[in-house]
Image (cartoon, grey):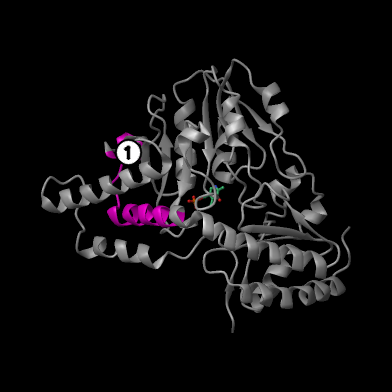
Amino acid sequence: MKKVYLDYAATTPVLPEVVEVMAPFWSQSFGNASSLHSFGREARIAIDQSREKIAGILNCLPEEIIFTPSATTADNLAILGAVKNRPKNSLITSSIEHHGVLDTFKYLEKQGYQVDYLPVDQQGKVELSVLKKTLTGQTILVSIMYANNEVGTIQPIKEITSLFKNKNLLFHTDAAATAGFLDLNVQNLGVDLLSLGAHKFGGPKGIGLFYVKKGTKLSPVIFGGHHENGFWPGTESPGLIVGMAKALEITTNQNQQNSQRIRTLRDKLITGVLENIPETFLTGHPKERLPDIASFVFKGVEGEAILLRLDAQGIAVSSGSACTAGDLRPSHVLLSMGIPQEQAHGSIRFSLGGQTTEEEIDYVLEKLPKIIADLRQMTPRMD
Ligand SMILES: *Cc1c(COP(=O)(O)O)cnc(C)c1O
């Protein structure tokens, strides 16, 4: 059967060049980077060179990059580290964050911090006027994602950070959905802390990073050694680090042409879906959105049912809701955007990538209308 992968926002295949540069590090150049002998030095050099390469892309200093196992870990270390050893003052985030951020703030709320979850408009953009009103002299940390991984809406990070001039607070952004599509120059963005995970941009799973602006007062929250400036103790994986650096280099170099190609295919998908399937709408911002994501609500149908039917045709996508055992709540992102609960249950996210072809989009457009029509016939309308 034909296999069509349209779930790049969940994870991407590792680029062949990345597999190649990682290969020597498993059984040949396997040294522990903390060892003083030649095996160790070889590993240390590989890590240092990767850190420099990444720093060049983010336009920061190598020592401002901390390697972690994932973007989720980076989110946790950034947020918990920023508030530790500081008075329990107020924190601000948005209501549409990834759980790596959202759940960390929920935990802090239980610990006695005051947390404001900023609302978003119907297109998923954070309301800057509300942010301005919420900011006080007591605010010590603001965390707002660069772009949303479910609907693709991009937040105006530069505009947001310009509000913080002369304010004594830290700003963190979860940029995990953006590499290869948006500018990651941390000086331009004006951020203090930023998280990324390699498997979203053609790198391996199990490695991510966070950027910590020099001079930022951040406390370690786990312990065990001096690795990664003490923020992520434990033996580093030179293979994964080298792989992430290579993947970031390739995606950054290909940014323009790749984004344009993906955007064109994505727009074809959006137009085809909206023209051929009634009672369907696109979620997220119509223009200020990542080029790879197209997510829809198909009224009167369950997202999971669509996902399974598509899977039966070899097409892999995500559904916005998490109707797994014990969790019947639809996506917090869609609900925050004011989409009614019963509609939010009918959401599907398509996310495209470097290997997506026009033929694959045509295949989806051939299969999807019938799947939706069949499901609508079977299931009684919920709304
Ligand atoms: C994928 C994703 C994460 C989690 O990344 P991991 O590296 O898998 O932990 C966090 N935030 C956003 C916006 C993402 O898209």
- Where does the image place residue 338, in percent across and percent down from the top left? 79, 44
Residue 144 in view (yes/no): yes
Quadrant where the image shows the C terminus:
bottom right
The residue furthest bottom is 1
Question: Seen in the image, is 332 located left or right of residue 34?
Answer: right
Q: Give the amino acid type for the residue marked by disc 1 in the picture.
A: Pro
Q: Is residue 130 above or below residue 152?
A: above
Question: Seen in the image, is 129 located left or right of residue 159?
Answer: right
- Where does the image place residue 7, in percent across and percent down from the top left? 58, 63
The residue shown at (26%, 45%) is 48
Residue 206 in view (yes/no): no
Secondary structure mostly seen in the magenta stretch: helix
Between 276 and 262, the residue placed more toward the observer is 262
- Where does the image place residue 243, in percent across and percent down from the top left? 35, 57
Label 1 packing within 10 angstroms: few (<14), some (14-19), many (20+): some
195 magenta-colored? no
- As helix, strand or loop, the secondary structure at mark 1 comes to helix
The residue shown at (37%, 43%) is 56
Q: Is residue 360 above or below residue 13?
A: below
Between 331 and 357, the residue placed more toward the observer is 357
Quarter occupied by residue 375 = bottom right
> Which residue is labeled 1 in the image?
62
The residue furthest left is 37
- Where does the image place residue 58, in percent across and percent down from the top left? 42, 41
The residue shown at (44%, 37%) is 77
The image shows a total of numbered marks equal to 1
229 magenta-colored? yes
Region in magenta: 227-251
